[in-house]
Amino acid sequence: MFYRETGQFKTSYAADMQIFPIRQDRIALWVLLAVAFIGIPLLNAFHIWPFGNEYMLRAILIPFLILSLAAIGLNILTGYCGQLSLGSGAFMAIGAYSAYKFGTGVHIPFGLFDLSIPPLPMLPSILLGALMSAVVGILFGIPSLRIKGLYLAVATLAAQFFFDWVFIRVKWFTNYNSSGSVSAPDLNFFGFVVNAPIERYLLCLIFVAIFALLAKNLVRGNIGRQWMATRDMDIAAELMGIRPLYAKLSAFAISSFIMGVAGALWAFVYLGAWEPLAFSIDRSFQILFMVIIGGLGSILGSFLGAAFILVLPILLDQVPHALGVPISVETVSLLVFIVTGALICWLLIVEPRGFARLWSTGKEKLRLWPYPY
Amino acid sequence: MRKLTLALAALALAAPAVTEPALAQNEQFIPALVYRTGPYAPNGIPFANGVADYWTLLNERDGGINGVKIVFEECETGYATDKGVECYERLKGKGPTGAAYFSPLSTGITFALTDKVPGDKIPLLTMGYGRSESRNGAVFPWNFIAVGSYWTAADVAIQHIAKELGGFDKLKGKKISLVYHDSPYGKEPIAALEARAKLNGFDFKAIPVTHPGVEQKSQWLAIRQDRPDYVLLWGWGVMNSTSIKEAAAVGFPREKVIGVWWSGAEPDVTPAGEQSAGYKALMLQHGPGKFAVHADLEKNVVSKGKAAAKEDFAQVLYNRGLINSMIGTEAIRTAMKKYGNKPMTGEQVRWGFENLNLTAARIKELGFEGMLQPLRFSCEDHQGADVARMQQWDGKAWKTISDYYKADDSILAPLVKENAAKYATEKKITARDCSKES
Amino acid sequence: MIAFGQFLEVLVSGLLAGVLYSLVALGFVLIFKASGVFNFAQGAMVLLAGLALVRSLDFMVAKGLPFWAAIVIALLFAAVVMAITAWMVERFVLGPLINQDGLTLFMSTIGVTFMIEGGAQMLFGSDVYPLRLFPSDAWFLFEGSFPGGILVSKIDVWGGLIAAVLVVGLALFFQKTKTGRALRAVADDHAAAQSVGISLNWIWFIVWLVAGLVALVAATVWGTKLGVQFSITFLALKALPVLIIGGFTSVPGAIVGGLIVGAGEKLAEAYLGPFIGGGIEYWFAYVLALVVLMARPQGLFGERIIERI
């Protein structure tokens, strides 16, 4: 009754081709953005539940936003271009450490050619860091021209373990810190130092909103169609004149770029100080889970998957405590394991295509409601 | 499906709303970041049990601290930094005055929290781990690296080797290798060991083992070829017992392997069985075994069935948990002397830490005589003590084999100063002027 | 001569270590071969089998049973636990997911991993439990020719022997028994196998059971080496490069892959490590695998990938 495009006539090509062709979708998006950009900060300012306390922002919303961004990055590669990757952690780490280097000043002592860049503010250092991640992404994407499927997934683990090692071993990356742990420089955003949780939240939100819209726009354009053609059948795509080299490597580059941004945000905004273990293989798996559970080939799915994988264990963890059931922490965390695993299996049995498919089925039903025939 | 999603969403909204029965106003909230599951659980469990049991003891025996009851809540981190940060955010504001202090028992979480605690004004008690330079209280006002740092440990280990060899001059030309967990934790001692190597003229070699350390064959074959005189072991979890087994397999004498205090507990030696016999490890002053406080625990906690401990009662890491809680609660007690007998805020507890003076008499009164030497924090010194002993596993139990060594401040103090200054410039911190603190 | 002795020692220990990785990799191969599922839960299954074994063993030794009897009963008990797990996985997870694509099945095994890890620790505890089934000291061979001899760990040799027996046993099982032939038929083509009256559900149960038993064997060796504890699940990560070098579908491939990875990473650590900083064996195994894959994208022994439009 409410969700129906009847009567929305397109009178120009531009109107026909916009990102969200249905008016209700557009309204929903604006409402969502308004809530995220204005509503939550207002609730926070007036300490109104549930966003009044720092916990909601710092421990749930900020990591949720950052990991959604990483999931969008991986979704471009795995969901749209069909290249399974288990190296997300590595690309996030490259983004984080490069951004750290740019943020604290790069100095490459090469004898004659002595390169020095003074410390940059946060925005350029994050973007440059992400660029480094994209370059490495292209490099590690080259094997994808020959290796496919699960074999490629395991091969991308080479990147994961190699960079885990590099950031531990090469002291240059950690500014010769004796322990090899680094802490983020000030978050200087156009002369404004981002510090309070709500400011950090807004910073992440700006990045996520921009990159999500960019990604949404990319995947419906020429390049996105090339990716999807490659995913669905690479030989057929090649015969149609799509260059696999270009399609696959561009997917690797863009996906690594976004994951690099996510990595830099994870390190700078969420953790503050980190060691390579923060970007270990567990992180790679976590992001892959988000993408699969959320739905391959869906930007919205990345958000839903991130919410499910990140928030579910935290919630389950607090449920017995909130209900006042006296169980030990050990039992609770093991139960969280079991329940999370069971829910993943159950969800896959009910809907193997993830939350995104559930969402679109829901939309289809909503269109017909209340007259299902 | 939709119903369940709705239910989950409702749960999501409800969970923070259903707060636990409102805490009474006269209660001190202390959070505990623990890991009872995952790869490091064998080491995390006894420590967490010790921490919890001491608080229960205070509640059961004395009714809390000066009449203020202790309320504590555990949060499982699984040794993961991001989970630790989540736990920190969850627990920092609980109770009438917020969290008293945090003890994460993880170098990674400590690093992440070091940046966050000044903003939230909650002290960080990292007993025997964490940033070695955080000893400098002027730069790190909120960190308390109580009892010993990795640099203390490294220095004492070398002192013990020198003693075994018969003097510091005998160190010249000797080979000492460090087998370490390839992470900030394992890398911390390298700076101090390199300084010592330069001073005493021994050959120092650092051999990394990749996390989690289940496979160390090549490292130990290299040691077999290289034949160092001593091997220092800086491992955690499964890596320790694997190292000892590999040392046995390559025939490296266990008497020449010296572990740090995080490699010197029961879970580290028992999996290797009789092969561990002879292995030595540093003690963070204390060892296993029962002392006066354990009698109190048995009477007030264990017999009432309120103990968290099972077979780990009075083990090394359990005792460390007890001491950790004791130092924390004594800091709260110290703070109460200034601010009155009511729940303390993090800021007040920090003052309590900084002015904590555990004299030998007080330690005896608390039942910790024989476990801990006098400890005194000050504005400049957030470590309080820098002595350690050596213990040896005889196949069945840990035996203390040395007297207390005092770490050489002439080597470590410049290191602390230099690294603290580096941190201060990096984070644009102006060090406090300690002469003006009261 | 010393240098050569050292080389030999590193090589031999690397080869043996590689065979131990193969023990874990074999479980992956079995399940992938028969059902096309990349079984992420193999590491967790090793943990579960090990915990069931060591906890029941300790329990019965404490009850005063003679050691050999306790071992036999404990092995049986662990086998039953693995059988129950296999049945539950088939019944509640993979059965309903029949005919789904590989990625979904892979994801579902991750769910299974969580459940097994949580369940195993809840039932049997999350501490470290020492297991002593094999001697863990070492032989020193050729002490006449090389100073100090060549070190060979006894447990590694035991592991190698067990792996050999296991491979022969599995080969016989696949070639000679009716169930084995049915397994191969299913691996070839699900639908065709179903049409000649092979029950897919039964076959999948058998496959998961066999993989569970392989996990139990791996647990006896690795449990002796490390003590049974959660970290044992990380072995799955050491088994992955073995798996892709050998190919996902080949039992002998898993052994050969293990030999290559083991020897390669140990030699690299010993001869390359000192120059670039050490601790390289983890990623070196994967880089080695990557190089092999660039030459043969389906692994050394994998089935050729034929693509049609």
Image (cartoon, coloured by chain):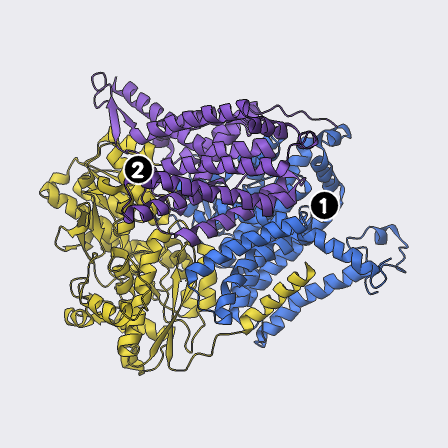
Horizontal side, residue B183 vs residue A120: left or right: left
Classed neighbour count for the residue bearing mark 2: other residues with Cα under 10 Å, few (<14), some (14–19), many (≥20): few
Image quarter hosting the N terminus of chain A: bottom right
User: Picture coordinates of residue C289 (x, y %)?
Assistant: 50, 29
Q: Nearer the viewer, residue A106 or A268?
A: A268
Q: Given the current orientation, which residue lies at the most extreme left position?
A: B166
Q: Colour of chain A?
A: blue
Q: Which chain is yellow?
A: B
The image quarter containing residue C234 is top left
What label does residue C68 carry, if any?
2
Q: Nearer the viewer, residue B357 or C138?
A: C138
Label 1 lies in what chain?
A: A
Tally the marks: 2
Q: Is residue B170 above or below residue A1?
A: above
Q: Is residue B15 above or below residue A261?
A: below
Q: Colour of chain C?
A: purple
Q: CA distance from mark 2 to mark 1?
A: 64 Å
Q: Is residue B141 visible?
A: yes
Q: Is residue B225 above or below residue A48?
A: above
At x 20% / y 56%, what residue is drawn?
Answer: B287
What label does residue A219 carry, if any?
1
Secondary structure at numbered mark 2: helix
Q: Amino acid at mark 2?
A: Trp
User: Picture coordinates of residue A240 (x, y %)?
Assistant: 78, 30
